[in-house]
Amino acid sequence: MSQQILLAVALQQWDAFTSHALTAREVAVALAKGCGAKLAVLSVYDYGKIKEPSLSPDMIARYREDIMQRIDAQMETKLKAFLADVQGLEVPITPMVQAGEPRKTIVEVAERLPADLLVIGAHSKRSVLDAMLGGTAAYLSRHAPCPVLMVTPRR
């Protein structure tokens, strides 16, 4: 069946891991183990609006670079913590963090791997705008180069 599974999780905006992300991780690991597949785990994030102090352009560039490096390091640490419970379960796991727009970045990574299956957690909190635009899950189901498995936590 699937030789390469991609699990995409949103970790940036949460202090604790959501039940959606944890359930998606559980399902992706079980599928990878059952199929003998490799598992890539991707968390896409953005730098947000970085407030720039009134400094010279050179100093502003260094300041922005420093902030971006800190965010990169924070995301790597978060993903490492997210995967700590599943390391050593006889599933080859490749952690991946990438700055960018989540929808497009996830599709690009799925194409590049190439992924045979994309696993995502379904979010319960959606804004009106997100619902009108179709949400990330809807976008991924239309544009991903592979089947998309949307996982919801048990109630």
Image: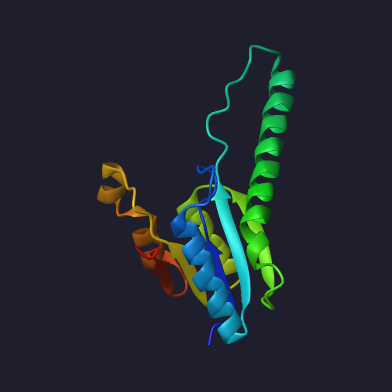
Estimate the x, y position of residue 42 in percent, counting from the top left.
58, 59
Q: Is residue 37 left or right of residue 147?
A: right
Instruction: Answer left or right for 114 relative to 103.
Output: right
Q: Quadrant of residue 54?
A: top right
Percent position of residue 52, x then y: 61, 20
Residue 79: name its quadrant: bottom right
Q: Is residue 69 above or below residue 6?
A: above
Residue 3 seen: no
Write the residue at 48% across / 68% down: 119
Residue in the image at 54% along x and 83% along y: 2
The residue nearer to you, when weighing 77 against 117, is: 77
Q: How are the colours assigned in the image?
A: rainbow
Seen from this angle, which residue lies furthest top?
54
x, y percent for residue 114 = 58, 73
Given the current orientation, which residue lies at the most extreme front position? 155
Snapshot quadrant of residue 110: bottom right
Q: Does residue 42 lie above or below 88 as drawn?
A: above
Q: Please state, as top left, top right, bottom left or bottom right, where the C terminus lies in the image.
A: bottom left
Q: Position of residue 75 (x, y in %)?
A: 64, 46
Residue at the image point whose x is 57% and y is 63% from the top: 109
Residue at the (43%, 75%) spot, across then down: 147
